[in-house]
Image: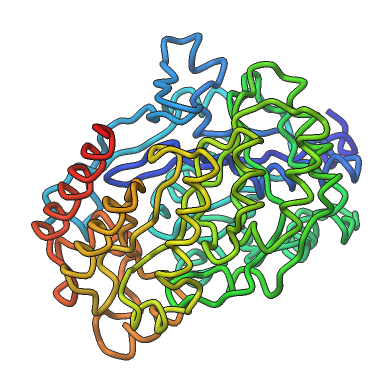
Amino acid sequence: MTESRKARRVLLVNPWIEDVSAYDYWLKPVGLLYISSILRDLGIEPILVDCLDRYDADFLSSGGESQEKYFGTGKFHEVVISKPESMKHIPRKFKRFGIPEELLRRKLRSTGEVAGVFVTSMMTYWYNGVVDTIRVIREELPTAKIVLGGIYATLLPDHAAANCGADFLCPGTGIAPIKKALECLGINAIPREDWFMALDPDYSHYTRLPYAVLLTSLGCPYRCTYCASGKLWKGFSKRDPVAIADSIENLTDREETEDVVFFDDAILFGDFKALLKELLKRKIVRRFHLPNGVHARLLDVEMAGLLYDNNFKTIKLGLETSDPSMQLSTGGKVTNEDFFKAVKNLTNAGFTSREMSAYIMLNLPGQKVEDVEHSLEMCGELGVYPSLNEFTPIPGTEQWKTLIEDGVFDEGIDPLLLDNSLLPHWWKKGMNASQVQALKEMEWKVRRSLDGK
């Protein structure tokens, strides 16, 4: 391969997850797919290896199973691996989720020469998967330059630099880290600044695509104390509804793509009604989902009707807590009255308990068991599926800073221990494992009671 051809090929890798548990709840690497589109726009050939693709053709042909559950979600292939030293005392198995290691090695060996490798990262407590993925890349492509970006690299850059094994770290969001990554690889190219408005995530890499994830906006106008959106995105920007509808229409050319998922942080603040009206006008028939905790305050009668008419099957409302004082102290984005109105509007529009649910934060600092119990009871009375969302301290948030200042844990703590599944096993300032389990059982009891109605 000539040097010029090599310089125009970049490998993109979505790494394994290593944790005690993981589930494919529509986990597509949207940021990496946007980078793929940006590279194509520059005349650079992107090659994607997605370790979390349950429908990978090589994985399925070698006997793997997609393990689909509902609406395209499902269980990852998993193997038990050795526990990291920091969690040796915790009675949980540690697992690797994603394609088998030998398959990843074969894929890497088959890519040919590339100018470099871009590796993304998601949750900070999933960093072990990033480290192991980069280790394998290094062994199979010893001369390739490896660049790490994504959420983990952005929120914990010092930890990533010390542990991940990449040649370069490109923290941040938007176009700046991509410019830096190209410079690190010695590629002389200037990506377009209007990438979000002009380009779609590049789903052409997938041989089978039961679901697709899209964004209509970036950032969030709220600054909730437990959320990192404000640290990741410095503003709030919205994409043109017609362009989004075009993107969805292009996706529907693939008959197997039955589910379209929006993962915005604040989707109802965008021109979402205009998009819903555009989808109705074009008669685009798919199942749509809003799994990211929409703002109840903005879910009025017209919005509820448009969601129902467009066949939305998942609507997660961000209740977080029913305690008015805690609602105010954590950001003030919702009140109980806002929540009651939103549920009424959705119910009147025709949504069932299974289709609308409420995120309830579990184990927030200072939160009492009784608060969670009251929130669960409130959901049962209103006919809304409760969905417990266990608190995870996220580096850089106001909650994180307060916990550090109060000496709850040291800033140098292993990020793995902050995983919400592990936190109750050691954190003395919150709910213990037995309390968390009792609340989860109450959650399922409420759900079963609603199923019986």
Indicate the quadrant containing the N terminus: top left, top right, bottom left or bottom right: top right
Indicate the quadrant containing the C terminus: top left, top right, bottom left or bottom right: top left
Residue at the spot 46% in from the left edge and 31% down from the top edge: 73
Residue 170 in percent (x, y) is at 65, 63
Residue 205 in percent (x, y) is at 70, 28
Residue 261 in percent (x, y) is at 60, 40
Q: Nearer the viewer, residue 263 or 155?
A: 263
Residue farthest bottom in this picture: 405
From the viewer's perspective, tell me whether residue 2 is left or right of residue 21. Answer: right
Compared to residue 239, the image places residue 100 above or below, namely above
Compared to residue 282, the image places residue 432 above or below, namely below
Compared to residue 380, the image places residue 63 above or below, namely above
Total count of labels: 0
Residue 434 in percent (x, y) is at 8, 57
Is residue 108 among what the camera can see?
no
Residue at the spot 47% in from the left edge and 50% down from the top edge: 316
Q: Nearer the viewer, residue 16 or 452?
A: 452
Residue farthest left in this picture: 434
Name the quadrant containing residue 18. top left
From the viewer's perspective, tell me whether residue 121 is left or right of residue 340. Answer: right
Name the quadrant containing residue 278. top right
From the viewer's perspective, tell me whether residue 346 is left or right of residue 8. Answer: left
Q: Nearer the viewer, residue 291 or 55?
A: 291
- The figure's colour scheme reads rainbow
Is residue 394 among what the camera can see?
yes
Name the quadrant containing residue 233. bottom right
Residue at the spot 41% in from the left edge and 16% down from the top edge: 65
Compared to residue 32, the image places residue 332 above or below, namely below
